[in-house]
């Protein structure tokens, strides 16, 4: 690269320098549009130092690109779901004004952003054991009589996933309609080796967001469908952090997950998200349109699905998370494998502690994403100084994602607490208002805390200069999202 002040002596040199300055000046105007100042500064620094390299990277990764067709379909389906929600029976559609203050504002916000309302009359079971969750899902598939809908970021062709696959094969042999939506990156291997066999058996297997170099109107390659949803006969639903894969991502530290098994009216919202994703990928409804099928109450739990994706006009989950933190009165416990907060999230945590709220963050000591963990670690000093208690779980790779507010409000789903989940990935999280479910989650959290080491400011200050540099460098990378 020619220096900013270099004076070329050849005509081609003048052309090159002119092109570099043209890039700098144009991007100086374009980059800051609808972008946080910190991210804009990081991009502009790269572009001013390396104009052509910066321009190419910006064209590839600079904007969260989703084809207009997908955005239009999502808006159309959301409008349809909103109209269907208004027709749900009064005994299941909860009036937000009747909810306690700790959840009413969040429920109203979530419905405004996603069209899904808070629904009463549900039963919820927390499944923190890996094998138990897989076994329950396989058993529910074995009991299916009409249809099975699975949407997963990772669906593998291994010994653990085989339990679910065999249940699907048995279901198809009984005449049950089985449809699978699998992310094109996360389930890449299974789409090559397993999907052809499943299709031959009569299952519908659809690749979500396939990565094709020359595919026109494609989404940005790192925009992924990170959801984990299963719906059986429209009556039983699963949502959480667990993929259909063996828990061996971190050698010696198998994944530990958290899944919600739910029955009742909110299952219709899970199935609606599945069908919306299917329509967006197939470009047609093929006779199965997204809807909210009325379901009879099965319990007394209030629940609301909160999907998020780049196609929504705002960062749904991030806004909901910040809103709940600001409404907390006593205690917040966040469990996540990755915590790389954006500025609103970080400010909300600081403000909560300043208001006298106890904030606990549970993260794994061991991880499979070195760059992300370096970026995450770069925030620990700020969090500790603010008064956030950080606990590092040492037994397994804690892949569970949950939030507990005041032992009353719970969120469990697929979203990490980082900018990728906030802005790039399609995610699904269940917002639950129920004291008993919150009690069960507290027991799970207390077990995690008992097997964790609390990080202290003194301990963290001992890390080497090289580690600090690596962490702060990784932190910059998140601005390129």
Image: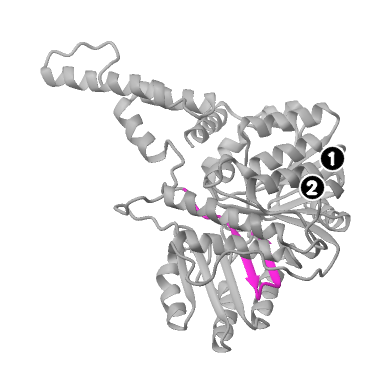
Residue range corresponding to the magenta coloring: 223-241
Residue 255: in sight, yes or no?
yes
Residue at x 57% of width, y 40% of height: 419
Q: Vertical placement of 29 versus 357: above or below?
A: above
SS at circle 1: strand
Q: Quadrant of residue 61?
A: top left
In-image side of 10 versus 233 (left or right): left
Q: Is residue 224 magenta?
A: yes
Residue 93 image point, x, y percent: 78, 58
Residues tagged 1 and 2 counted as in contact (Cβ below 8 A): yes
Residue 363: in sight, yes or no?
no
SS at circle 2: strand
Query: Between disc 1 and disc 2, whose residue precedes?
Result: 1
- Which residue, given by chain and number where applicable, does mark 1 sit on? 331
Q: Quadrant of residue 151?
A: bottom right
Q: How many marks?
A: 2
Residue 442 image point, x, y percent: 84, 52
- Which residue, given by chain and number where applicable, does mark 2 sit on? 404
Mark 1 crowd level (few <14, some 14–19, many ≥20, 10 Å Cα): some
């Amino acid at each position: 690269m020619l220096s900013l002040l270099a004076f070329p002596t050849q005509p081609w040199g003048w052309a090159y320098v002119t092109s570099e300055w043209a890039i700098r000046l144009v991007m100086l105007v374009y980059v800051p549009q609808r972008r946080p100042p910190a991210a804009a500064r990081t991009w502009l620094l790269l572009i001013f130092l390396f104009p052509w390299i910066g321009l190419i990277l910006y064209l590839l990764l600079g904007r969260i690109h989703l084809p207009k067709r997908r955005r239009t379909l999502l808006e159309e389906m959301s409008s349809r779901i909103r109209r269907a929600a208004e027709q749900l029976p009064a005994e299941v559609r909860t009036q937000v004004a009747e909810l306690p203050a700790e959840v009413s504002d969040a429920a109203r916000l979530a419905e405004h952003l996603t069209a899904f309302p808070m629904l009463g009359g549900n039963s919820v079971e927390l499944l923190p054991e890996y094998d138990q969750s897989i076994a329950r899902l396989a058993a529910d598939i074995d009991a299916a009589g009409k249809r099975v809908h699975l949407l997963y970021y990772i669906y593998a062709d291994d010994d653990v996933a085989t339990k679910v696959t065999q249940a699907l094969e048995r279901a198809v042999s009984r005449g049950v309609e089985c449809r699978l939506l699998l992310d094109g990156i996360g389930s890449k291997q299974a789409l090559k080796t397993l999907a052809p066999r499943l299709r031959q058996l009569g299952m519908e297997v659809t690749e979500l967001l396939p990565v094709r170099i020359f595919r026109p109107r494609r989404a940005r390659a790192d925009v992924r469908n990170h959801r984990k949803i299963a719906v059986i006969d429209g009556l039983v639903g699963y949502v959480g952090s667990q993929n259909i894969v063996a828990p061996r991502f971190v050698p010696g530290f198998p994944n530990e997950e958290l899944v919600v098994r739910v029955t009742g009216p909110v299952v219709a919202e899970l199935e609606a998200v599945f069908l919306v994703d299917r329509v967006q990928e197939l470009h047609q409804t093929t006779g199965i349109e997204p809807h909210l099928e009325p379901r009879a109450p099965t319990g007394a739990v209030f629940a609301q699905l909160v999907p998020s994706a780049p196609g929504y006009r705002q960062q749904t989950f991030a806004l909901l998370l910040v809103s709940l933190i600001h409404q907390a009165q006593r205690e917040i416990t966040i469990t996540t494998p990755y915590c790389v907060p954006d500025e609103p999230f970080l400010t909300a945590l600081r403000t909560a502690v300043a208001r006298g709220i106890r904030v606990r963050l549970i993260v794994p000591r061991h991880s499979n994403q070195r760059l992300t963990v370096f970026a995450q670690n770069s925030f620990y000093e700020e969090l500790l100084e603010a008064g956030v208690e950080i606990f590092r779980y040492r037994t397994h790779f804690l892949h569970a994602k949950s939030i507990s507010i005041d032992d009353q409000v719970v969120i469990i789903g697929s979203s990490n607490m980082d900018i990728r989940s906030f802005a790039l990935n399609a995610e699904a999280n269940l917002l639950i208002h129920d004291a008993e479910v919150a009690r069960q989650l507290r027991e799970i959290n207390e077990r995690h805390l008992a097997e964790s080491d609390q990080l202290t400011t003194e301990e963290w200050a001992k890390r080497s200069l090289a580690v600090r540099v690596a962490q702060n460098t990784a932190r910059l990378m998140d601005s390129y999202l």
